[in-house]
Amino acid sequence: MTFSEVCESFFQLEQDLYVFEWEVDGIRVWELIRFKVFNTIMQELGFYGQAHTVPDRGIKAKIIMSYRLLKSYIFYNPFCIKKHSIIFNGHPRRKLLSDGFYWDIYSDYVANLVQDGVVLEQHYGNGHLIPAKSVRLYYNDFITTLSYFCSCFKLHNKNNIDSSVCKSIENAVTFNFNINVDVYGVARKVLERYKVDLYLFKELFKIVKPRACFVLASYGRNSFIAAAKECKIPTIELQHGVVSRYHMAYSFPYKNNKYNFPDYFFAFGEYWKQNVDFPIPSEKIYNIGYPHLETCRSALKHIPKADTLVFISQGTIGKRLSHFAVQLRQSAPAHVRIVYKLHPGEYDRWREDYPWLVDSDLEIVDSHTPDLYELFAQAKWQIGVYSTAVFEGLAFHCQTYLVDLPGVDYMRPLLDSGYAQLIKKAVEVKFRYDPVEIDKHYFFAENWKQNFQHAVAEILGEDAIKRNQ
């Protein structure tokens, strides 16, 4: 089966079994485990590799993490957030920028534009990236740790899970994809944490009484969103990456409702709104733009193009893409600079996972420098599969090739529109610079600050906007 065929079969399985109607103690289970079950299927079928490095869980790492947790409980406890703030549940994988600070490039730009905006952050690996740019920053460690210990006592009665429903899903997965997935085990584990998290976040919201909650990657914030909804707090998601028909956290083609989806979605641009079946009405999707991209593109517009090609790696397809890059280096003109830009989740493991890159003639970028946007500003060509960075490269006028690897179906609208060319072999890359004219605003709306302020004022009222900005 191809990637797209697996996805379409998965959609049909959902329809045939009415899985969105499955509830345990009033909790809609399938929407909590859907993304996990789908990713497990894709990994078992060999479509996905390891996306991120697994954190060290040794004794030394645990001691260091315990110290950091204690520090965060005292100085960054979310229960100390000022009342009536607007909470941004941000992205923990911060980016080190030229000012020496680690930025949440999705939340930090906008959190300062609203009255009493604060950033709430989950741990990244075994800690948090510091020094952080966020002005008012709190860590979610207290809730995460308390939730973990409470779940160890099995407060959720696992016998309430209907094993027959799980079995029917497991049988359907086996029949359609010829693999085994422990749906019952996934559901039990998720529900044990979900109930505790839901309770703790509701207690937090009762104390803080936030006027609104912004989230990133809503599929990892289900209990946070559900607690906000129960407390009648508006929820808004800030787009942070590629969303498509085949991204199971956002795509609901049969109009299945997802209770734990934010009330509003702030998209990068019109392209994303048109190409995804979101589980909310289109009038609740706003085209905001991408603050970090817009800011950097303006600052780098003076850099001239050079004979540079940038590969955009991802952990899920990194092994195959890196082999492709080595092949291309062997056939490409000697004067062409070929840069292999690793994903942050690959930085500390690429030598072990992709040893063929170590002695290759490729320029490997395994840190925050040089900056990806600086590379795009110089590059005439880019090669990727389905990374968000592909769209960012287009915004820098990079001629775009997509390798026919698992996940490229995410980019079908991009290929159909002629903005990118699909290739299977390295020899198909032509080193002539002839970029397609694109409407950059279609992917990333301009004037993000204006767009954001207008949308927030419309949803939350003018008094939510900070003055003199």
Image: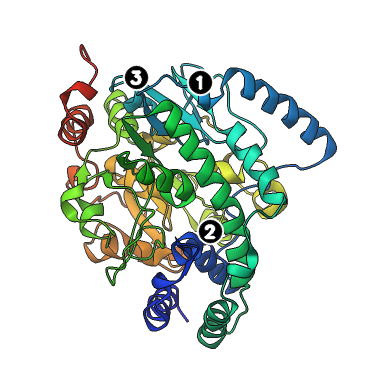
Q: Residue at x 50, y 19 (%)?
A: 101
Q: Position of residue 419 (x, y in %)?
A: 25, 56
The label shown at residue 116 is 3
> Which image quarter holds the C terminus?
top left
The label shown at residue 80 is 1
Residue nearest the viewer, comparing 461 with 387: 461
Q: Residue at x 42, y 81 (%)?
A: 17
Q: Give the vertical position of 362 relative to 452 (above or below).
A: below
Which image quadrant for residue 274?
A: bottom left
Q: CA distance from mark 2 to mark 1?
A: 46 Å
Q: CA distance from mark 2 to mark 3?
A: 44 Å
Residue 254 visible: yes
Q: Position of residue 268 (x, y in %)?
A: 27, 43
- Reading the image, the residue beneath label 2 is 321
Q: Give the vertical position of 104 relative to 379 (above or below).
A: above
Helix or strand or loop: what does disc 2 sit on?
Answer: helix
Specify the farthest residue to the right: 59
Which image quadrant for residue 141?
A: top right
Residue nearest the viewer, comparing 95 with 80: 80
Give the mark, 2 or 3, whose residue is nearer the N terminus: 3
